[in-house]
Every structure is written in structure tokens, then in C-alpha cells.
Amino acid sequence: MINDIEQVLITEEEIKEKIKELGEKISNDYKDSDNLLRRVKRCRGVYGRPYSTH
């Protein structure tokens, strides 16, 4: 069970880079909006759960 992965298709670093890229795009797309992302972040604080473990 430990060696059940034949090949890694996308590295952890590639995933982190894509997340960063998408975050920047989302921020740019909504920079002139009604602060939707700030409201989402505020909800995170209310529920007390982080979006990721990193």
C-alpha cells in the first residue's frame, strides 16, 4: 500500500505555484468589486477554520 503510486504527475511545488497564480488572478479580477473576498475572509474568522493547513 505504501508504494501504490506509480508516477507523480504534478509536484507539490507546481500545485503551490498554480494556487499562488490563481490567487493573484482572483485578486486582480475582484480588485474593483464590493470587497467580496474580504467578506469571505471575515466569514472564515467567524467559523474559525483556516482554508488550508499551510
Image: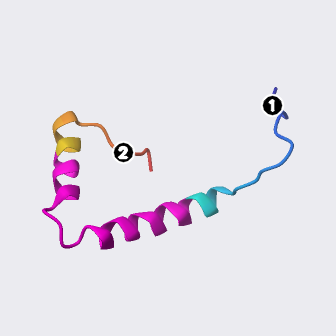
Check residue 24 for magenta coloring.
yes
In primary-sequence order, the first of circles 2 and 1 is 1
- State the residue position of label 1: 2
Q: Is residue 20 magenta?
A: yes
**Vertical relation: 43 (above or below) 14:** above
User: Which residue is painted at 54% across and 60% down in the image?
Assistant: 16
The type of residue carrying mark 2 is Tyr
| Residue on which disc 2 sits | 51
- The range drawn in magenta is 16-42
- The correct choice, above or below, for 11 with respect to 4 in the image is below
Label 2 and label 1: CA atoms lie apart by 28 Å
Amino acid identity at mark 1: Ile
Q: Looking at the picture, how far across and down is residue 4, in whole percent? A: 83, 33
The image shows a total of numbered marks equal to 2
Side of 29 where 32 appears, left or right: left
- How packed mark 2 is, by other alpha carbons closer than 10 Å (few <14, some 14-19, many 20 or more), is few
Q: x and y percent of residue 29 in the render? A: 31, 70
- Element class at badge 2: loop
Quadrant assignment, res 6? top right
Residue at x-position 18% and y-position 42%:
43
Residue found 63% across the figure and 56% down from its top? 12
